[in-house]
Image (tube, rainbow, N blue to C red):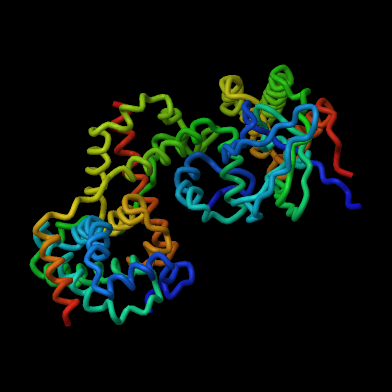
Amino acid sequence: MEAVVIAYKFMRLDGTSVFTGFGWPLPNGRPGAWVDARIDPCRSGIHACRPSDLPLWVGRTLYEVELDGEIVEQPTKVVASRGRLLRRVEAWDDALRDAYTRMCADRAHELALGANPPLAAWDAVVEPSIPEGPALLGFVAARIAEEISGTGAYHRERAGQTEWLVERLGLRTEG
Amino acid sequence: MSRAGIDNRTAAVSSKEADLLARLRDGDEKAFESLVDRFHGTMLAVARTYVKTRPVAEDVVQDAWLGVLNGLDGFEGRSSLKTWILRILVNTAMTRGVREARSVPFSSFAADEEEGPAVDPERFRGRGDAFSGHWNGYPNDWSSLPEETLLGRETLAVVKRAIDELPAMQQRVITLRDIEGSSAEEACGALDLSSGNQRVLLHRARSHVRAALERHLDA
Amino acid sequence: MPESAEHITCQEVVELVTGYLEAALPADEMALFEQHLNFCEGCVWYVDQMRTTIATVGRISEEDVPVETRERLLMAFRGWKQS
């Protein structure tokens, strides 16, 4: 028997896909129904996140998804021909979203003001970005890291965001 | 052989078209009328981008239909019927346009290669700014506009005017793609464009029209 | 072409939007485009504006065939039939 492939998927509040608006069969005590799709990487297929991809796709609600069929790993996502939603990750609620936003904002300040010379203009962008939510702040923090120390720093910042999320959401990590 | 080539995706004659073709060759007048109804308007719009005046464009379309009839028996179905008809139209219009150009001042037609960004660079934060390249102020959320505004006659007029202002090739592409509803492959086949060129022209055309719509809606 | 491999700007988005809607961008640009939309409300609205623009253009109906033209063409068709 093959190992079950678990991944994650951010969705809109109403359980529809962020980019396609596709209405997923939602789990309700039991997994949602299987959905099949033709794979054409980045054009069609079931798209999902590994933990390391989470910060890039932060959205309103988070689900644990089981993937099956043909599974293709891409740089920032996994694409499968078959998937079903197992459960909603309840821990990802408004309070945690706000905490994550705050964490990224604090990191952004720390990085910008800790630079030599300080990146005052970038620092000034942080607070006004807060109302736009966690995805933007995550980007701002990583972007500031990149501005100071390059591509590696961008990825390290993202990895730090993943760590924060995995810990507080109690997710299964990669083997 | 055109750059668009004989591409499988240009879709050789479909079964529905094969049906129509048989009826046409049989002399079925209803079939011919429905063909005319379907393509005449588009042919006129495209012809209009090649020649100076409307009466000449109507003439061109008339000639093109005669060309279609003359070629109907010999049509081999290597491209779709639609692409073939539009190609005849384009060739007829081009020939007439070239003949006319001898007496038309250059200034009559806008440059086909309209370089220029899709959106005024002033709308974005500058190089060297934090967040360079990002919006200075967001564009508006049109989903919050009342439906009647977007569906109204005035809005349609703004859009029509914006399309009329376009350089000829951009006008042809947006007419075939977004008004007539051709696929990218069909538009490439009809206009003898590479898919890359077609996309660039479509992009410029749509960007221009969006900007015109934005000026109208945000006023 | 995107200046960074990690992210694209709004200015790049407005140039890539047609490729995106045609599903003609290379896979990596596709992913960068969607990642950007995921955090940038302004660009979500811009892409939506573009979709609305396309839909509005689609509402333009081509001219009807004038009666004289229709008759002339039918005559031509009958003439062709006979030959």
Spot occupied by residue B126 in the image (x, y as percentages of width and height): 46, 36
Most foreground residue, B198 or B84: B84
Based on the displayed image, in which of its 4 quarters is residue A164 positioned?
top right
Residue at the outermost top position: A95
Q: Is residue B181 above or below residue B153?
A: below
Q: Looking at the image, how many numbered discs can be counted on the residues?
A: 0
Which residue is pictured at 56% across the width and 44% down the height?
Answer: C33
Q: Is residue B38 above or below residue A162?
A: below
> Is C39 situated left or right of B61 in this image?
right
Spot occupied by residue C40 in the image (x, y as percentages of width and height): 55, 33
> Is A38 situated left or right of B93 in this image?
right
Which quarter of the figure is the N terminus of chain B placed in? bottom left
Which quarter of the figure is the C terminus of chain B placed in? top left
> Is A7 situated left or right of B178 in this image?
right
Q: Is residue B111 visible?
A: no
Most foreground residue, A134 or B184: B184
Based on the displayed image, in which of its 4 quarters is residue B35 positioned?
bottom left
Which residue is pictured at 14% across the width and 60% down the height?
Answer: C70
> Is A137 situated left or right of C41 in this image?
right
Q: Is residue B75 visible?
A: yes
Spot occupied by residue B163 in the image (x, y as percentages of width and height): 26, 47
Which residue is pictured at 64% across the width and 28% down the height?
Answer: A137
Spot occupied by residue A168 in the image (x, y as percentages of width and height): 82, 25
Residue at the outermost right position: A1
